[in-house]
Image: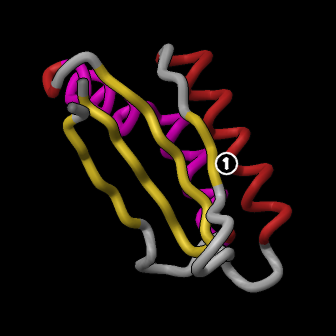
Amino acid sequence: MIAFYRNAAIASGKVGSAIAFAQQIAAYVKDKHGVDLSIAMPVAGNPNRIGWAARYENLAAFEAKMTAITSDPHYKELAAKGSDNFIAGTIHDEIWRTM
């Protein structure tokens, strides 16, 4: 099983709109691509972050879905519109293999 995690630092004064954006992206990805994204925020450390997580059967499934999502014109449009909610350069992705 492959776990994909993405997180980003929220820009000052944008917590509410960042949460709304995270929910909008998650709903779109679920409806259009069938991928369940969970949304989380830290309870310790730097609280001004938000993250998404998804699980995939294997690396091939991850790659196929990510290719479809990142080449989707409407997804690109949504992501561009929501980018002002985050501090530039703070998006961090990780791919983990579950044990």
- Which amino acid type is shown beneath numbered disc 1? Ala
Task: Tell me the chief SS of the magenta region.
Answer: helix
Q: Residue at 26% of width from left, 16% of height from top? A: 57
Q: Position of residue 91 (x, y in %)?
A: 43, 67
Pointer 1 residue: 22
Question: Does dot 1 land on a helix, a strand or a loop?
Answer: helix
Q: Quadrant of residue 30?
A: top right
- Near mark 1 (Cα within 10 A), the count class, few <14, some 14-19 or many ≥20, is many
Residue 58 lies within the magenta run: no
Q: Residue at 82% of width from left, 81% of height from top? A: 13
Quick one: 94 or 14, which is closer to the camera? 94
Q: Residue at 21% of width from left, 32% of height from top? A: 99
Q: Which residues are magenta?
A: 61-84
Task: Give the vertical position of 2 relative to 5 (above or below).
Answer: above
Is 36 left, or right, of 71 in this rendering?
right
Q: Position of residue 85 (x, y in %)?
A: 68, 69
Q: Position of residue 47 (x, y in %)?
A: 67, 75
Q: Residue furthest bottom?
A: 12
Q: Quadrant of residue 4?
A: top left
Q: Residue furthest left?
A: 60
Is 83 left, or right, of 58 in this rendering?
right
